[in-house]
Image: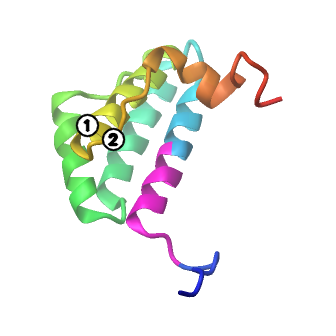
Amino acid sequence: MEQKRVECPLDIEELGRSTWSFLHTMAAYFPSKPSQQQQSEVHHFITTFSKFYPCPHCADDFRERLKEHPVDASSRRNLSRWMCEEHNVVNRKLGKKEFNCELVDQRWRDGWKDGSCD
């Protein structure tokens, strides 16, 4: 069997992994004390993002979830926590292991305390 070329379009799993990496990293670097405008802009970004995500089923599901559990952009910590909780909702649906949301800063911002990211 031939190995898949690196330059191929992303499959749904690669797209999901890449998307979550981007979203978690964005949340990890969101301001600790965001202005009202920054909070509004991240709400707008995530809402718009949910309309154009290239997996229609995923996008529909995310938009429904946003109605039930709106974005909390009141702080970097809250946005990171919200993102982690939303990711865990998807993980449960897919039968994947949940992530400990207490570790979001180590995973997406600071690196693991054991120095393995240094």
Q: Mark 2 packing: few (<14 Cα in 10 Å), some, or many (20+)?
A: few
Residue receiving disc 2: 96
- In this view, the residue in front, 25 or 114, is 114
Horizontal and vertical percent position of residue 86 = 32, 33
Q: Is residue 76 visible?
A: yes
Q: Which residue shows up at 43% across the image and 20% down it? A: 81
Which dot marks residue 51? none
Q: Is residue 29 visible?
A: no
Horizontal and vertical percent position of residue 73 = 42, 22
Q: Amino acid at mark 2?
A: Lys
Residue receiving disc 1: 92
Considering only vertical position in the picture, is 16 above or below 39?
below
Q: Is residue 17 located in the magenta-colored stretch of the structure? A: yes
- Element at badge 2? loop
Q: Which residue shows up at 53% across the image and 87% down it? A: 1
Q: Which residue shows up at 42% across the image and 60% down it? A: 13
Q: Quadrant of residue 99?
A: top left
Mark 2 and 1 residues: CB-CB less than 8 Å, in contact? yes
Considering only vertical position in the picture, is 32 above or below 50?
above
Q: Which residue shows up at 70% across the image and 22% down it? A: 110
Please state the extent of the stretch shown in magenta in the rendering: 9-20
Considering only vertical position in the picture, is 50 above or below 95?
below
Residue reaching furthest bottom? Answer: 2
Q: Amino acid at mark 1?
A: Arg
Horizontal and vertical percent position of residue 91 = 32, 39
Overall secondary structure of the magenta section? helix
- In this view, the residue in front, 11 or 50, is 11
Horizontal and vertical percent position of residue 71 = 33, 28
Q: CA distance from mark 2 to mark 1?
A: 6 Å
Q: Is residue 108 located in the magenta-colored stretch of the structure? A: no
